[in-house]
Amino acid sequence: MSKPNQFQELRTRADTFWQERTDQERKLLRIGGIVLGLGLFYSVLIDPALSGRAALHKSLPQMHQQAAEMQNMAREAQALQSQNTIAPTPMTRDNLNAGLAARGLNPQSLNVTGEYAKVQFNGAQYAGVVAWLDAIRIESRINVVDASFTAQDAPGVVNASLTLRQGVR
């Protein structure tokens, strides 16, 4: 049976049901339908809006408190940021060699001049070089200014030329 035929049959049944009712029953069914519709309207649209509004009104003071705490924490963080920090140990040839030795790296050459250092690796493990660079960046605030990596035939082995500079921050 197709959809239009089903709809037509349903409509015919409803009309027959309605015609069999007395005027008083029809009046009661109309009033019951209106009450049911209003109850559904209230429960679906009005009540959730009112209860949501009440919940937000109740949580608003707590949100204001949290906002004030976050503003205080932001001011404190800004104040701490402007304070002088402990200066890192100066970059020296001995410090760099100690860090390289601790990671099992043996540079081909290591030259330190002022704030800059030039390091040359031949046949070094890439993962070890990167781990060492990360460690000196965190511990001594030494950053890579220039880097050149050349992959070798063995997996994970590189030739590298690095220029490092110790920064203030």
Image (cartoon, rainbow, N blue to C red):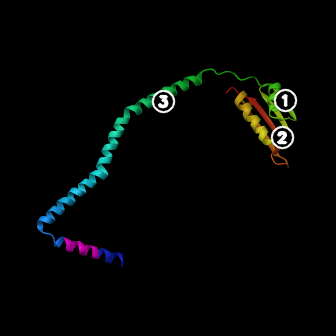
User: Image point 15% across, 61% down: which residue?
Assistant: 28
Residue 111 image point, x, y percent = 84, 29
Asked which secondary structure carries label 2, the reply is: strand
11 relative to 120, above or below: below
Q: Amino acid at mark 1?
A: Asn
N-terminal of the two: label 1 or label 2? 1
N-terminal of the two: label 3 or label 2? 3
Foreground of the two, 152 or 104: 104
In the rendered view, does 13 fall on the left or right side of 48? left
Which image quarter holds the N terminus? bottom left
Foreground of the two, 117 or 107: 107
Residue 169 image point, x, y percent = 67, 27
Residue 12 falls inside the magenta stretch: yes
Residue 124 is tagged as 2
Q: Which residues are magenta?
A: 9-17
Residue 23 image point, x, y percent = 11, 67
In the rendered view, does 167 fall on the left or right side of 12? right
N-terminal of the two: label 3 or label 1? 3
Q: Is residue 145 visible?
A: no
Q: Amino acid at mark 3?
A: Met
User: Image point 27% across, 55% down: which residue?
Assistant: 40
Q: Amino acid at mark 2?
A: Ala
66 relative to 26, above or below: above
Asked which secondary structure carries label 1, the reply is: strand
Residue 70 is tagged as 3
Foreground of the two, 36 or 94: 36
Residue 11 image point, x, y percent = 26, 73
Give the labeled residue for mark 1.
111
Distance from label 3 to label 2 (Cα)? 47 Å
In the rendered view, does 104 fall on the left or right side of 144? right
